[in-house]
Structure formats: C-alpha cells, structure tokens
Image (spheres, helix red, strand yellow):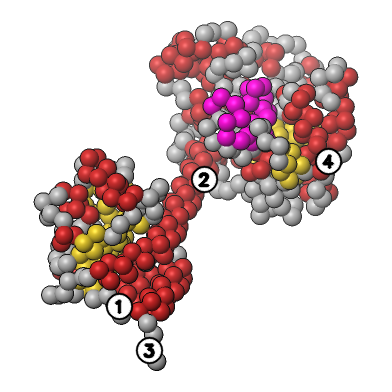
Amino acid sequence: MGMTQEENLSSLLVEVWREACRHIEISEAAPNLAAILARCVPISQLLIRRIDQAKPLLETVAIGCPIPENLLPDARSEGSPKVMQRILRWAADGRVINCDELSAAEEWVRTLIPRGVQGNILAGPLGGARHPQGVLILVAAGGVSFNERHELIAGQILDPLSTALENDRRLREMVAMRAAAEADNDSLLSRLGRKGLSDTVVGADAGLRSVMERVELVARSDVPVLILGETGTGKELIARLIHTRSRRSSGPFLRVNCGAIPIELVDSQLFGHEKGAFTGAVESRQGWFERANGGTLLLDEIGELPLAAQVRLLRILQDGWFERVGSHSPVHVDVRVVAATHRDLASMVAGGKFREDLWYRMAVFPVLMPPLRERREDIPDLARHFAERAAVRFTLPVALPTPEDIRLLQDYSWPGNIRELGAVIDRAAILGDGQRLEIAKALGAGTSHVAAFGPTSAELAKPSPPPARREIVSLDEAMRLHIEAALAATQGRVEGRRGAAALLKINPHTLRARMKKLGIEWSRFRESD
C-alpha cells in the first residue's frame, strides 16, 4: 500500500531537515536539498539569497541545481531603502508567493529575483518574521507552472532552510572574527617588534633567575599570585608566563587595569551587569571574571580597587561565586587570579586602605620583580633585544649598541625601569636613522643628566673634569624629545593626574596640539607592563 500525500510530505521534511543540518556551509547543502525537493516539486533551479539590509541588496549565496556557467543569474540585486522595507514587510508576513501572480512591474519583486532567472517562480522568506535574513527562490522546470501543493511544500521547507542559512551566517562571522583577530594580533606584534607572545624572557638566566624559579614553582598550582614591583619592571610578562606554563594555558588570559576603571563602574566591569541594572545598561554584559572563565585574570594595579569591590573579590577567591550587578542569581567561575601592583600593600593595610583578609589571601605566593638598577647585568642583552625590536617597528636597518653605549646605559639609574629602557632605545634608533644608536642623545633628553646618572668608581677616584659641552639641537627637536620622554614615563597617557600633561605642567589640549605639530604619536608609547 503506497504512502499518502501527508506521509510523503512528512518523509520529505525529515530528509530536508537532515540535509540542512548536515552541512555548516549552505552552499554545500543546496545541491542535495534541490535533489530531494525535485522528487515532489518540478524545479529547474533552487537559489538561496541573503538579505543585506545595510547596503541594501540581496546576494545569492547558494545554487542548488547544476546551471551552465553562461546561464548563471546575477549574484547581487541592489534596491533602494524603500524597496528593502517592502521586502522586509513581505518577509515578516512569512508567506510563499507565486511571482507570476504579482505584477512584474513591482520593483520589490524584481529585486527579489536575480536577473537571468526565467520561468514560473516561487519565493519564500527565510529567517522568520523577527529576523528576516534571506529568500528561497524556486524556479519551475521549462513549461511547467507551480500549483497550490507546490506552494505548500515550499512553505514547509522554509524552517530547515532558515536554520541552514543561520548556521552559514554564524560560520562566516566566526571566520571573519578570527581573521580580524589574527590581523590585529599580527599588527600588534609588528608594532611591538615581536614574533610572538612567547618570546624568550631576557635575563631569565641572570637578573631574573630567582623570579623564574618562583614562576616555575607556582605555575603548576592554582593559588593566587601577587606580583610586586615598580612600574615598568615587566609584571605583565611574568603573569603571562605563569598562565602559559599552567594547566590553564589553553584558556583565556585577560588583563584589566583596576586603576583605569571609574569607581562607579568597577562592579559592572569586573562582575558584569543585567539589562536595566542602571541607566545606560541597555543589555546584559559579562564582566572580566566571566570572560576569563577557565583561564587566568590579571588584576593590574590591584591596590587601586575600592574597598567595596575588594569584599566581592575576596568571595570569588574563596569559592568562585559572585552576582552580576542587578541580579540575584549567583554565577560560578573557575578563574585563577594573578594580581600586580607597584604600591606597598602592607602599608595600605596598616592605613585601612586595603583589606587585611584580602592581603593575606593574595599574598600566598608573592613574586618580587627587581628594578632594572638592581639587574644591570641584563642591560646589554635587553639593549640588543630592544634595538632589534626598534628596527622592526620603525622599518630601519638593525643597529646594535656599542660598548660605549652599553657603558652609558649601565651607568644610568633607570627610574622607569625596562619600559624606559625600551623607550630610550626606540628614541636612539630614530635619532640614528638606522645607521647607529644615538644613546647619548636619547639619554640626555627629558631627564637631568647629572641627577639621573650615579658616579662610577673610576669617577670617584679622580678629580671631577670640567662639564662636557652638550650638543645643541633645535628648539623643536629638544621639545619633541622632552615630550617623548614624558610619554615614555607615563606609558603614553596624556591626560589625568598621572599623564604626561601633568608631568610637564601643561594643559592637555596644548600638549596634544604640540604633539600634532611635532609629529608625535602617543600610541607608540603604549606598551604592556
């Protein structure tokens, strides 16, 4: 006994659903879908078109029947915003239409159907009434017209084809996001003059040997780590090492500068918020802890966290639970916290500015980063590393420091530590234009040469010579070097009480105007700690 029409239709839908979900890219599924449909509907072509409301246009993304190349329809159909609104109204209605029954003079119908398609045509919207995203086009075989049953079948397959088109859209977005992320990563590494985030740590076998030993010990565990050290000593680099050498290396590593978050937004930034939790919260948002789930979160400048946020941070460290702002539903995360600060937290605890219980929790395994003046043996290798990096960043020939350059660098006190050394080498490379490193000029700009340098043992053993005559440079050049030194010391920050404008005692707008005139890019001095 043969199957009824209803049973045939049910069997057809099962096959269509199976095929639609089998492939991620809809262009791969379309030929098989057309073959299945052709058993019940007399079609010569099956086309799937994507709606682009922004441009506005319709683009053919899949063809389900073999078509000779010389008969391929136009891939794109452009329309006016008014036409697109008419198409969207039809799509929201959700009905399959027989285009022969509509006037061919209607512009929105002509936009639906790509030029080059001929014959009786059925069109159905894909994506549903709320999120129309595409159109199904069925073209009848030569000399055949679609009937009501064919229209019914076309309407039944809109859901599985909508799902297939949505999967295809998400795949394209993921591919585009990955490509953009890789491009951003390559661009960032190029600007930093690095080949990758896993570059060798300069000084690992010398001035940082004790630090590296502690990193190896703590990386295998999940205890919180507190990295202490002056600004510019490389605390973020050590935090990344702890992450990459831990069992969480495949998870995310995120850094948040606690000192850069406005006090009123600390909870929202760290723990997230629900839609409507406060004015401006137009949608729910994950905080840093949720985004770092399964990985490591670096809380840089943890000493800047307000006391109220410290309480909630303590709870997360204890049991991993927290609540978003505006929510009463607890969220659990598995995050390893690494904190860093240049401040004396013990004194802050004594002064009531940092919670004692949080201090004890964070200080389970402290790592102390030595300042550069205490690891002068690393300066030659660091200088060569930064010189090679500068050549890449500024597309210059590699110019390495001479023995005299190294002596000058080792005699300097380095209040800005490694970050300042990197900025000095960058400045020296630019001044030398790839021919040499102008270390003396780079060091003499923006600092007091007498105060910055400590006397060597040889200098203490002999009478002081008369002061050497310094090379005179133009006023613009001196100003440019001075501003660059201030930007290097403030990590490229222009405004605020820790910005270059405050350091130079100048209005930020005036400083920006002078930077523009002198061709100084503040972003060049934005480097990771």
Residue 417 sits in quarter = top right
Q: Position of residue 327 (x, y in %)?
A: 67, 36
Look at label 3 and name its amino acid. Answer: Gly
Magenta stretch, residue numbers: 255-280
**Chain-order first, disc 1 or disc 3:** 3
Task: Classify mark 4: helix, strand or loop.
Answer: helix
**Chain-order first, disc 1 or disc 2:** 1
Look at label 2 and name its amino acid. Answer: Asn
Reading the image, the residue beneath label 2 is 185
Q: Which mark is residue 2?
A: 3
Question: Marks 4/1: CA distance?
Answer: 63 Å
Q: Which residue shows up at 73% across the image and 41% down it?
A: 330
Is residue 356 left or right of 516 when viewed as pictured? right
Residue 431 visible in this rendered orientation of the protein: no
Q: Which mark is residue 238?
A: none
Residue 275 visible in this rendered orientation of the protein: yes
* Foreground: disc 2 or disc 4: 4
Question: Marks 1/2: CA distance?
Answer: 51 Å
What quarter of the picture does the N terminus occupy?
A: bottom left
Reading the image, the residue beneath label 1 is 40
Look at label 4 and name its amino acid. Answer: Gln
* Foreground: disc 1 or disc 2: 1
